[in-house]
Amino acid sequence: MTKDNTQMSKEEQQKMLAQWQHTSLQAAQKYLAEKGIVGINIQAKESRILPPICGVWKIKDNQGKGYWVISGKVPTDAMPVSGAADARAALKHFSYQWQIKADKILGAGRPDPTQTEYANFLIHHAHGVYDLANKDQLWANVAS
């Protein structure tokens, strides 16, 4: 009985992981599509999923241009693949960019409460993503 429960639990976990990954990837593709970028090739070996926080996807569009896209429980964002050598560096780049955006919002005189809330949202996620990038155990199996 215990073995069946354990097996079922692993199967459920795998299904939940697959669903999370699918949803995160769809969000990344939707984000690019809204910007007029049609991604047709997911570079799975270079992409990283860090459930339930985020996925960092390396995607090539139909013109051969590459993008790093982050999605999940973080702001969905994208940058050219030339901005980071790998998914770990992309996380740090997104963190830095979100900090800059937040600083601009907060430094622009008197931001309204919604802008201040958004800036704090960016700061919170920038710190979290940077912490993920700095956890060596998450990147131990990644070739440098």
Image: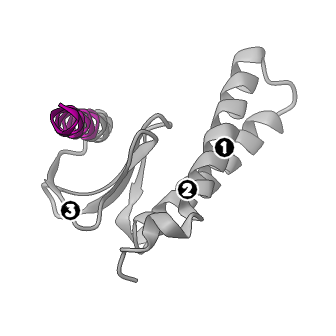
**Where residue 43 is drawn, which disc sits there?**
3
Outermost residue on the top side: it is 113
Amino acid on which the number 3 mark rests in the picture:
Gln
* Label 1 – label 2 distance at C-alpha: 20 Å
Give how far across and how far down residue 76 sits, in percent. 43, 38
Image coords of residue 47 (percent x, y): 30, 60
Whether residue 137 sits left or right of residue 58 in the image: it is: right
Magenta stretch secondary structure, dominant:
helix
Disc with the residue nearer the chain's start (1 vs 2) = 1
Q: Given the image, on which type of amino acid does mark 2 rest?
A: Leu
Mark 1, residue position: 101
Is 53 displayed left or right of 67 in the figure? right
Of circles 1 and 2, the one toward us is 2
Mark before the other along the chain sequence, 3 or 2: 3
Q: CA distance from mark 3 to mark 2?
A: 21 Å
**Residue 46 position within the rendered picture, expressed as x and y whole percent measured from the top left:** 28, 67
